[in-house]
């Protein structure tokens, strides 16, 4: 299988190297060249690779281009960003790349993870297909690409000639699925043990809707810390505003801009996220967790948790406990 590892300006290339290493180990373990990997560009010009800073870490010259229709698949990494406004700006800069993806022949599979899913959706290749995306860009892709059948509860979605995965480590479930399919379960198990690869999560926890990536404002960080330290029964817009020496209007505006949630709803979500962490990482009884976090009524805590997460606390613990 001939796979193109796509490099382009602004891409997060680290996952490509890890993906390549996993497949090369699979080749060695299988005793034959199951996967052929080639560094691929939109053209043959050298690509500056960075680690998120403006200064390039190194430059890579592609071995082939997207015009090479002998590729069976192309793996697309995400690009450096931390908010939805920047995604819109980046996609405009990547119009030539998006157009090149659109022109790939139908037999060429497209695999993308993290923000690369935005480029796949922009190319139209995901229309009428199932796909997933990183949780904090869910609103963006739903608003901009309604023709895609989005499945955000899944961390990796396989559909026809496309694979989409969430997160910067989204390359991992893609690699593992390929190794299992083409080399067998025994080879995959050996590689997981040899490389100490964690088992990927197949579902996304509901409380990832808290957009922590956007909390780059000092006041919002202080808000988050205050809510975590304050008993749930004592949470109020007024108390928060007094503590942070801000007006309720200012805090409401900041939270709405950053999270698209009312201030009171965001505080509730933070507190329930705390509860979810206890459910995942501790064995404390649910009523004790409710008491520790300062909920005045255990029954009300359970109802609220169910309403927000779609799980009862017991169901959540069973689904996600480590």
Image (tube, rainbow, N blue to C red):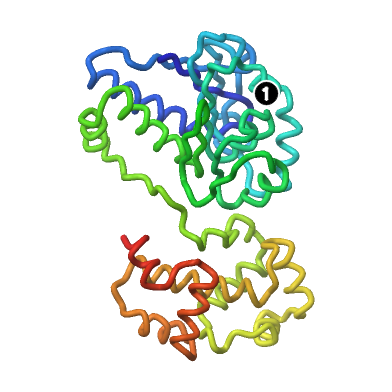
Q: Position of residue 235 (x, y in %)?
A: 59, 84
Q: Which residue is mark 1?
A: 97
Q: Is residue 83 left or right of residue 158?
A: right
Q: Position of residue 222 (x, y in %)?
A: 61, 72
Q: Residue at x 23, y 19 (%)?
A: 30
Q: Secondary structure at mark 1?
A: helix
- Pick the quarter of the image with the C terminus: bottom left
Q: Residue at x 71, y 34 (%)?
A: 91
Q: Is residue 199 left or right of residue 83?
A: left
Mark 1 closeness class: few <14, some 14–19, many ≥20 residues within 10 Å = many
Q: Is residue 309 left or right of residue 322?
A: right
Q: Position of residue 193 (x, y in %)?
A: 22, 37
Q: Position of residue 180 (x, y in %)?
A: 30, 29
Is residue 220 positioned above or below 290 on the image? above
Is residue 243 positioned above or below 158 on the image? below
Quadrant in the rendering for residue 58: top right
Q: Residue at x 46, y 45 (%)?
A: 155
Towards the viewer: 96 or 7: 96
Quadrant in the rendering for residue 177: top left
């Amino acid at each position: 299988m001939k796979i193109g590892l796509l490099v382009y300006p602004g891409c997060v290339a680290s996952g490509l190297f890890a993906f390549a290493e996993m497949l090369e180990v699979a080749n060695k373990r299988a005793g034959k060249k199951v996967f052929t990997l080639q560094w691929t560009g939109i053209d043959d010009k050298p690509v500056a690779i960075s680690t998120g800073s403006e200064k390039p870490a190194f430059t890579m010259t592609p071995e082939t281009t997207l015009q090479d229709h002998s590729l069976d698949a192309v793996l697309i990494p995400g690009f450096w960003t931390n908010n939805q406004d920047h995604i819109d700006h980046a996609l405009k800069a990547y119009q030539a790349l998006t157009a090149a993806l659109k022109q790939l022949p139908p037999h060429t599979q497209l695999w993308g993870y993290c923000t690369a899913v935005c480029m796949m959706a922009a190319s139209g290749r995901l229309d009428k297909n199932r796909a997933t995306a990183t949780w904090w860009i869910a609103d963006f892709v739903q608003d901009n690409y309604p023709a895609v059948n989005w499945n955000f509860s899944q961390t990796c979605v396989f559909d026809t000639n496309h694979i989409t995965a969430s997160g910067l480590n989204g390359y991992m479930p893609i690699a593992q699925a390929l190794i299992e399919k083409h080399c067998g379960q025994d080879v995959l198990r050996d590689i997981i043990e040899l490389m100490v690869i964690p088992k990927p999560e197949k579902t996304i926890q509901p409380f990832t809707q808290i957009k922590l990536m956007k909390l780059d404002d000092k006041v919002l960080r202080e808000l988050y810390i205050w809510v975590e330290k304050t008993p749930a029964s004592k949470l109020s817009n007024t108390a928060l505003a007094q503590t942070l020496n801000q007006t309720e209007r200012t805090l409401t505006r900041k939270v709405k801009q950053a999270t698209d949630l009312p201030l009171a709803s965001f505080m509730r979500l933070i507190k329930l996220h705390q509860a979810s962490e206890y459910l995942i990482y501790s064995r404390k009884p649910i009523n004790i967790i409710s008491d520790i976090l300062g909920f005045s009524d255990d029954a009300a805590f359970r109802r609220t948790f169910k309403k927000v997460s779609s799980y009862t606390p017991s169901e959540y613990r069973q689904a996600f406990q480590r």
